[in-house]
Amino acid sequence: MAVELYWGSGSPFAWRVMLALEWKKIPYVSNLISFSKGEHKAPAFVAMNPRGKVPVLKDGDVTLYESLAILNYLEKKQPEPALLGRSPAETGAIWRHISECVHYFAPAASSVIVPVFFGGVGEKAEAMKAAATLHNELARLEKILESADWLVGDKPSGADLWWYPETMLVERAGANPAAQPLDLDLGAIAKRYPAIGRWQKRVETQPGYEKTYPPHWKKAA
Ligand SMILES: N[C@@H](CCC(=O)N[C@@H](CS)C(=O)NCC(=O)O)C(=O)O
């Protein structure tokens, strides 16, 4: 029985899991959930994830939610290519990057993304403070990527999987007209951070990029 993935367009959590499935070449049935129709709150979905959030992975008798848990599951199911490192040093470095993304970048990203996409841009001071954190983190990433193709080692890993969708989402929020009055300078990341721009393009040459790119972003382009 094929693995089934329930995902939503533009969700960085779901995007990571889809890319992991693609990079590992695990065949899967794709179930795109419509947020606007509230499909993630439908009883059948909540029976799989009581939090009503994507992604959810089904593999035979196993139903799993939480993207990090799913990544670990997929790593055990299909160890090659390894996305969570081969040596202790590599594994530690990958998890450090994931942890930094989750604990430092993502909360600041939310403080920008939520008001831009869902209203409340009146929270200007809050968003600008968050943007300063994002720029610090992007500058840190830029330094690493000035002398490396990938965040850890010489191959794409879970570290790239975690950071890439988040940088894309922040850039999209930064380019939104609602962000203009905030002067966040996040709408053209590649211009201000060229090494990050080159790395984003590199990620986009990996398997599954076209297939996993958020469909509603394509429509808006
Ligand atoms: N910690 C979860 C976060 C998942 C999450 O927040 N998904 C969002 C989309 S980005 C969602 O489904 N939100 C719908 C909702 O909360 O109503 C994970 O890592 O999978």
Image: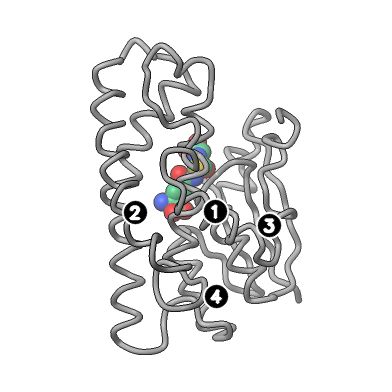
The label nearer to you, 4 versus 3, is 3
Q: Please tell me whether mark 2 sits on a helix, a strand or a loop.
A: helix
Marks 4,3: beta carbons within 8 A: no
Q: Give the Cα distance between marks 3 and 2.
A: 21 Å
User: Would residue 180 be found to the left or right of residue 210 on screen?
Assistant: left
Q: Dot 2 corresponds to which residue?
A: 101
Q: Position of residue 197 (x, y in %)?
A: 51, 49
Q: Please tell me whether mark 1 sits on a helix, a strand or a loop.
A: helix
The amino acid on which the numbered mark 4 sits, given as a three-letter code, is Leu
The label nearer to you, 4 versus 2, is 2
Q: Give the Cα distance between marks 4 and 1.
A: 23 Å
User: Would residue 48 be found to the left or right of residue 68 on screen?
Assistant: right
Q: Position of residue 180 (x, y in %)?
A: 45, 15
Colour mode?
one colour
Q: Give me the disc on residue 200.
A: 1
The label nearer to you, 1 versus 3, is 1
Q: Dot 4 corresponds to which residue?
A: 74
| Mark closest to the chain's N terminus, 4 or 2 | 4
Q: Give the Cα distance between marks 1 and 3.
A: 11 Å
Please say if 121 is above or below 221: above
